[in-house]
Amino acid sequence: MAKILDVSHHQNPNSFDWDKLKKEIDGLIIRVQYGSNLDDSKDEIFIAKAKQYGIPFGLYAYGMFVSVADAKVEAQNFLKRGDSAARFWALDVESDTIEACGTKNLAAASQAFIDTLKAAGKKTGFYYEHRYVGLYGLDNVKADFRWLPRYGSNDGTKQAKYKPVIPCDLWQYTSEGTAGGIKPLDLSDLNGSKTLDWFFGSVAPTKPITPPKPTTPKPTTPSKPIAPKPVATTAYYVNTAHLNIREKANAASKSLGVMNKNDRVQVISSANGWSKLKSGAKEVYVASKYLSKNKAVSAPVVQYYTIRPGDNLSTIAKRYGQTVKQLQSWNNIKNANKIVSGQKIRVK
């Protein structure tokens, strides 16, 4: 049985016993970004640690694109931010992705993201929530491997009866795993014919796709193209638990996604209480009062969430960086598999 750990800013890389972790896992999958606008705050440390301890790793990006064109831009940003030593590059599609993109073009945008990685010669993966199997055309998105989560009772062990209902190459079987002296963690195992060596044995990039030669005639009087002037930005940090990304500079505008406390953003400008950010090909907005020059000092904050149709406690726990057991304890939920739509539960 393989043991593959995926990590993001929800885990502290300095809390792991890395000598122990190296012996316990077969590879790491490290999150690099949450959409174009947001670097993962811990990815560089995890990558450095993986290299230091000789642990092979892949990378993933949480999709927050709003269109097919924006998906291509997000993929390009992923390529720029990622590390060339990565064995593979994966796209993660979850509920926030659907909030940003909608369902009509979700599969096409996901495919465009992956195709952009393929064109750069990368081995590609596609992760999406098990509850979306059979929906939105996601099963038809083509990547070098498919990675699906399905937890069952989610007690940290792999339970064969909860195997994903469609073929996949990696099975994320728990969000309550233990490795390197840390718990809870997301753990995955092989679930098909592909071997550990296929995933982590070599960088072995596939041959980049050669773009077609332009067929338009050259201008009779060629002129030197003028490079666009880079947009000056200033780094800020989110100082509230969750901050909505808005399409326009007003609170009634459509929410395109959510940022978390201490996430780093690049601000183009600020006016009338709103800060303008760059997100792929678009400009988006957040409330300026929730941004600070320095990282916020963590303080206990009580937060609640209203359960929606299709939710399960494992997904909610993962979204808010909690464990299922913690949510059960806070909300007096005896059976983790029995939650009711419309029920308001504490998540922080």
Image (spheres, rainbow, N blue to C red):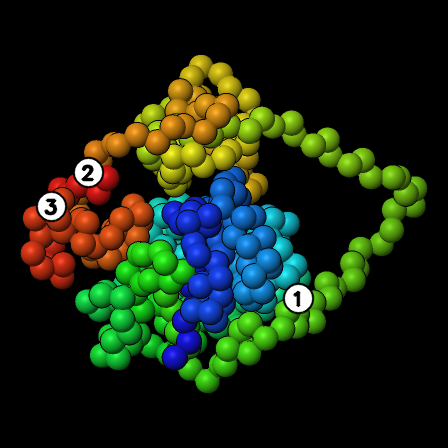
Residue lying at the far bottom of the rendered structure: 193
CA distance separating discs 1 and 2:
43 Å
Q: Secondary structure at mark 1?
A: loop
Residue 209 position (above or below residue 260): below
Q: Nearer the viewer, residue 219 or 98?
A: 98
51 in relation to 150, above or below: above
205 vs 218: above or below: below
Decide which of 201, 101 is in the foreground and name it: 201
Label 3 vs label 2: CA separation?
Answer: 10 Å
Q: Of callouts 3 and 1, which one flags the residue occurring earlier in the amino acid sequence?
A: 1
Q: Quadrant of residue 207?
A: bottom right
- Quarter of the image where the C terminus is located: top left
Residue under pointer 1: 121
**Depicted 158 relative to depicted 102: above or below:** below
Circles 1 and 2 in contact, beta carbons < 8 Å: no
Pointer 1 or 2: first along the chain:
1
Q: Earlier in the sequence, mark 3 or mark 2?
A: 2
Q: Which residue lies under the disc numbered 2?
A: 304
Q: Check disc 2 and give the amino acid type.
A: Tyr
Question: For residue 52, which quarter of the picture?
Answer: bottom right
Relative to residue 137, is residue 341 drawn left or right? left
**Residue sitting at 32 percent across and 27 percent down?**
252
The quarter of the rendered structure image containing the N terminus is: bottom left
> What residue is at 50 percent from the left and 77 percent from the top?
196
Residue 331 image position (x, y, % from top left): 11, 45
**Which residue is the site of mark 3?**
331
Residue drawn at point x = 58 percent, y = 26 percent: 234
